[in-house]
Image (cartoon, rainbow, N blue to C red):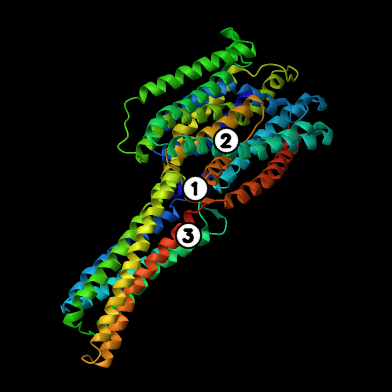
Amino acid sequence: MITGGASAIAFYMAWSIGSNDVANSMATAVGAKAITFRQAVLIAGVLNFVGAVFVGSHVTETIRGNIVKPSTISDPHALLLGFIASLLAAAIWVTLSTWKEMPISTTHSVVGALVGFGLIASGTQSINWFKLGQVASSWVLSPIVGCIIAFLVFRIIVKLIFDKAKPVESAKIVGPGIIGVTAFMIVSSLLMKTPLGEKIGVTTDLTVFTTSIFVGVIVALISMFLLRNIRAKSAEDYDTVERIFRRLQIVTSCYVAFSHGANDIANAIGPVAGIIPLASGQGFSSTAPVPVWLLALGGFGIAVGCLTWGHKVMRTLGYRITTLTNTRGFSVDFGAATTVLIASKLGMPISTSHTVVGAVIGVGLARGLAAVDLGIIKKIIVSWLLTVPVAAGTSALIFLLLKLII
Amino acid sequence: MEKEVEHFRAPIKDVVRRKSPFDGLLEHMRIVKKCVSLLGEGLTKYIDGDYENFSKLAKKVSELEHDADLIKGNIRAHLPKNIFMPVDKGEFLWLLREQDAILDHAENLVEMLDMRRTKIPKELRDDFKKHVNLVVSTVEAMEKAVENVKDLLETSFIRREREQTKKFIHEVHNREWQADKAKYTITKNIYKLEKKLKPMDIYHLLKIADWIDDIADHAENVADWLRAMIAR
């Protein structure tokens, strides 16, 4: 019963992530008309699911057992209620802030909620302060890293494509090159220390590396082949360059969706992953693998979120951010997705939306956008400072209430 | 339904502007283009002594000036302090201001001519027409330079595009210089007719030449600010 209820809330969280955060990060591709709303929903649904199931376990483990030290809470009942309280508190805060259109992050809500219950359940000793510090610094670092990568990718596009004598011809080589890197990142994340990697016998770092390089080169060659017939009308035919990137952006938007699934899935199912063994009477184990059905449930929730509500969000956003052309959108996507994927592999729960914002600012700083509103930085910092205490307070309150009732 | 759609958290929508200030600048420039081309035709007729539709032209120019003012105000209002642009915001606003000054001077010119329809003496008609054509072509050269901002933005200000813009700017200077020379010719020829013309006519003719020339001066200022704006 408890598992069922918790899964339902987790599903709701996944739905919320799917409808908001995914739509938010896919909107660059939709706004730049690289993909249609329908394709975006489909890509987001499928690749979030794939990312969640295959790479989602790292961050889930962090949420489950590395923020609050389960060993410090001896009563498994209290621990169970704590996880439920955190999940509920995060879901409530996310719903409220979505309603109020605040740029908060589901990640920050969940982490804040966990901290809240941990503190009230057994004081400061229950929190893994070192890990929490790492996570908190990753919140600051991820938008900055996203900003830097997007800045560099856009500068590469400018220097190696626009600044060349034949921009279109250069784009046909440089574009697929970056796509090859994208493929490398995805494949290596899928194989490095994952069950999938073990299954197909790719276990050592070296084999993972060579396999990924191989796939990356193949993908780059295929995209070069697909683009071979595009010709420039003149030396200043920048529209054709954009058209090339319109095609390439389909791949980077898949990259975004995949990375997103790998990271944000944990916000929905992390606490449930802690609840399941406790509810069935087993002790808490932070080493037990996250059940695949749970990852799949989260992935499915995200997909449903995209399908039911996400398309509306994407349509609205796609209409609003049309100034992000394909080369810009490509840089943003690549910067954000790479950051999120690396964070996922490191088990760092970060905010995808904030990373996307960092990436957009990066392209802006590279003189790639006509105008970037830096006022958002303040709003995001406020949302950080607000989300953690509010989620923590709510979670603590719900925890105490549940303890009284049950 | 429409209201429900808005309930989502999406920080990206607050970073990227829905409309670029440069789109506004080009939109404003297109009004300048339309206005100056109308003005060119209207002045040629005026010089030939055809005042038939001149009041209508004055009204039209005034309307265009007002439309452009709205665009200018809109651009300024949507450039808050925390906005980051690929060019200096101050230089951008000066460029806009000088572009707008072209319209102010065009409006002033037609209003003044409409108030006192000073007849242009036959001897001066060709000089005046030549001057008007040069002024209009200066503005046209300026339009071409400003229009290149699109390519500059697209390529993030690469050297090739900056060089091209500079070439267009050079052309503006060249034409403005010729317009100046044409004005001095007019002035000289007006003084030659000193004995023949009424003092008030002379005063007004000199003024007309100045007013027409003001338009080219401001087109040159636009080009200068553009040059400053695209400098590294």
Q: Which residue is mark 2?
A: A149
The tag earlier along the polypeptide, 1 or 3, is 1
**Chain to which mark 3 belongs:** B
Q: Relative to residue B87, is residue A294 drawn left or right?
A: right
Residue B95 x/y as whole percent: 44, 62
Q: Quadrant of the N terminus of chain A?
A: top right
Q: Nearer the viewer, residue A299 or B10?
A: B10
Marks 1 and 2 on same chain: no
Mark 1 and mark 3: Cα distance apart in space: 19 Å
Q: Are marks 1 and 2 in contact (CB under 8 Å)?
A: no
For label 3, the crowd category at 10 Å Cα-Cα, with few meaning under 14, some 14 to 19 and many 20 or more, is many
Q: Relative to residue B19, is residue B205 drawn left or right?
A: left
**SS label for mark 2:** helix
Residue A376 x/y as whole percent: 58, 49
Residue A189 x/y as whole percent: 58, 21
Q: Residue at x 63, y 29 (%)?
A: A343
Q: Which residue is mark 1?
A: B16
* Kind of residue indicated by mark 3: Phe
Q: Which residue is mark 3?
A: B92
Q: Quadrant of the C terminus of chain A?
A: top right
Mark 1 vs mark 3: give the one in front: 3
Q: Vertical placement of B186 versus B65: above or below?
A: below
Res. B39 visible in picture: no
Q: Nearer the viewer, residue A262 or B163?
A: B163
Mark 3 and mark 2: Cα distance apart in space: 28 Å
Residue A340 x/y as whole percent: 59, 31
**Chain to which mark 2 belongs:** A
